[in-house]
Amino acid sequence: MTIVLDGKKLSLESEKDFALRVDKIKKQNKSTPILATILVGNDPASETYVKMKGNACRRVGMDSLKIELDEKTSTSELKKRIYELNENDNVHGILLQHPVPKHIDERSCFDAIDVRKDVDGVTSLGFGRMSMQERAYGSCTPFGIMRLLKEHNIPLEGKSAVVVGRSPILGKPMAMMLLNENSTVTICHSKTKNLPDIVSRSDIIVGAVGIPKFIKGEWIKDNSVVVDAGYHPEKCGDIDLENIIPRCFAYTPVPGGVGPMTINTLIMQTLESCENYFNSN
């Protein structure tokens, strides 16, 4: 029987635990965990994502601090706002909504975030620490995927895994997280030669390339674990799931698989950051 890796269900179950932990912080420390979200410009999709993150905070009793900046904001102006949030003890997590306008140096702004508040897992320092199995907040989508796999006791050690996609906040950290769990990992992308052959030899397939149905069902062998981290306006992911669901060992539905775990992991890591702050003070 094929296992459905239901991210929506796990995220809702997790929120019950988060709410209890938030309530404990409020009672013991007279404080509320706060996630600061920074939105530069007026991209409609980004506005929607920021709203969803604010709603998720409120569902568990947390607060969100929404900072909206003009489309013409410069790199230095944006970094100044980030530094202010770094110094604000009432803010426990900082999220810079991706993408920012093209004239802004996004990587420089990501790396301006204090690693202790990098609850979205976007800094170079956080990525390096995570890769070296040191304490760090993981990039939310790949870490959400890892939580989903572990929740369903999906075996990872010794398995052959392929990650199709190499973005700094999804494909690359996904590969490192699987490697840290003793999978044997291949990283591919849209220009990889013989991609169907590589996919066909893999026990675990992660689609993170950002192209609708780029990975074909016939490439995937029976009893594989299929994780689709893509979502497109056509209401499909990066993997053509239609004909492989009956043959899979486990798969993430689109929508309802990976997506809910991304925001849920962001909330979880903001909560952890708040707990760590009070435990160290």
Image (cartoon, rainbow, N blue to C red):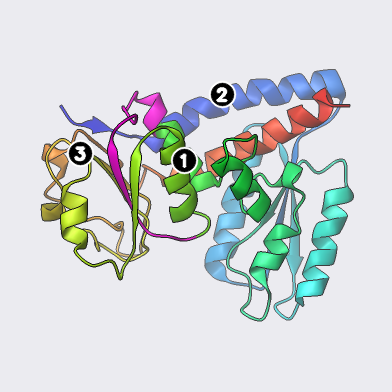
Residue 43 occupies quadrant: bottom right
Q: Is residue 94 above or below residue 33?
A: below
The residue carrying pointer 1 sits among few (fewer than 14), some (14 to 19) or many (20 or more) residues within 10 Å by Cα, namely many
Residue 79: percent from left, percent from top = 79, 65
Q: Is residue 44 above or below residue 261?
A: below
Residue 77: percent from left, percent from top = 82, 72
Marks 1/2: CA distance? 26 Å
Q: Quadrant of the C terminus?
A: top right
Callout 3, which amino acid?
Ser
Residue found 37% across the figure and 32% down from its top: 149
Q: Earlier in the sequence, mark 3 or mark 1?
A: 1
Of circles 3 and 1, the one toward us is 1
Q: Is residue 184 left or right of residue 280?
A: left
**Mark 3 = which residue?**
224
Marks 2/3: CA distance? 31 Å
- Is residue 93 something that shows in the picture? no
Callout 2, which amino acid?
Lys
Secondary structure at numbered mark 3: loop
Of circles 2 and 3, the one toward us is 3
Residue 101: percent from left, percent from top = 63, 76
Residue found 23% across the figure and 59% down from its top: 215
Of circles 1 and 2, the one toward us is 1
Q: Earlier in the sequence, mark 1 or mark 2?
A: 2
Query: Count of labels shown?
Result: 3
Secondary structure at numbered mark 1: helix
**Mark 1 = which residue?**
177
Q: Is residue 100 left or right of residue 140?
A: right
Residue 51 is one of the magenta-drawn residues? no
Q: Which range of residues does the magenta coloring cover? A: 149-167
Callout 1, which amino acid?
Met
Q: Is residue 177 above or below residue 23?
A: below
Residue 277 occupies quadrant: top right
